[in-house]
Amino acid sequence: MSPNIYDKTDDSGPEINSKAKTEIGLLKNQIIMIEDKRIKITFDYDAEIKYTGRYLRKNNKKNILKIGIFTEKKQKLKYKENDIVSILFIDKKYLFNFDARIHGIREAKESDEFEIDDMTFEFSSLKEYSGYSKYIFDIIPLTVPHKQQRREFFRIPLSVNIYYKITGIDETDKIEPGELKFDAEKAKKIKKIADEGILEKEMGYSKLTTIDFGAGGFRYRVIANNTDINIKEGILLYCLLIINEEALPALAQILRMTPDRQNQDLYDVRVLFDKISDPVRDRIMRYIFAKERQKYSGFGKTPENTI
């Protein structure tokens, strides 16, 4: 009998508590990722996500999960019926995966109510964009979900522009609550201002570019003799993360600064997000998974997007 992974959309599943660690519920339209079966995801795990999609519903009698995935139209599906795959998803602050067998594959119909607009906008402006094909996978769980790591530590090599201001040490009270609240319209306006150079020229922001990036923080390098004398461990930074035509606000703290092992003229700076809203964190995760899908599918791949 396959493990029971319940549908908690209608609260039909059991409560998640310390005694039910293997019971993980999936919400309707929850984003899922598919990759080749693997034994364990390690802390420095580099995802090889083949497809992104959504959990749609469950056939309770047969314990079959219905998920929707999409691929670029010119791309051939990498999986077929009876293949064993690994399904990844996020529940609260953790990344989970479980193995499943593909029971059936078909093209998606309108009646499936599988929408992908909010997962594809980052590629739609690319020259090689040719549209998407949507498929429905019926999958049978083979293992219980395994908790892999906190999602905020899920980082990948990624170049992201960030504008920041130094706020001091332990001075979070200087940040107004509204400054960290996500506002889509405001985020787009600030991105436009950033593109025009106003943040740096007139508003006192500095700019950095990350070498790896995740929902819990980022890492970047600076030239040793050009390092701002005010940049040191423990300093708080008010950040604007430039992602998908939006400037996303976050408060971050410099965790560690160390000389680069290969180039002593550079400092390696590790930064953790101290305060960040759920909408911003979710946008970061969606962006990361989209970039991973882009990297391994070859779709829309451009040199400046990866390191």
Image (cartoon, rainbow, N blue to C red):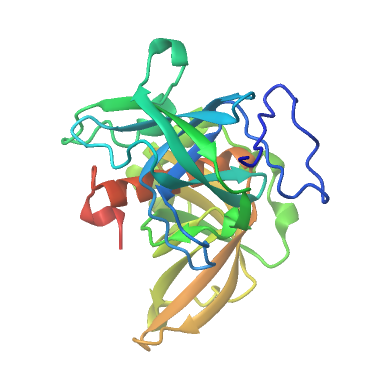
Give the percent coordinates (x, y) of residue 305.
Answer: 29, 53
Look at the image and tell me in which quarter the C terminus lies: bottom left
Quarter of the figure with residue 43: bottom right
In the foreground, 186 or 82: 82
Q: 90 above or below 130?
A: below
Instruction: Residue at 71%, 48% (x, y): give it.
Output: 22
Residue 205 visible in the snapshot: no
Quarter of the figure with residue 261: bottom left
Instruction: Residue at 24%, 43% (x, y): give it.
Output: 299
Give the percent coordinates (x, y) of residue 266.
Answer: 38, 81
Task: Determine whether, in the image, residue 171 is placed left or right of residue 295.
Answer: right
Task: Determine whether, in the image, residue 301 is placed left or right of residue 7.
Answer: left
Q: 266 above or below 100?
A: below
**Count of marks overlaid on the render:** 0
Task: Determine whether, in the image, residue 99 is placed left or right of residue 134.
Answer: right
In the foreground, 127 or 137: 137
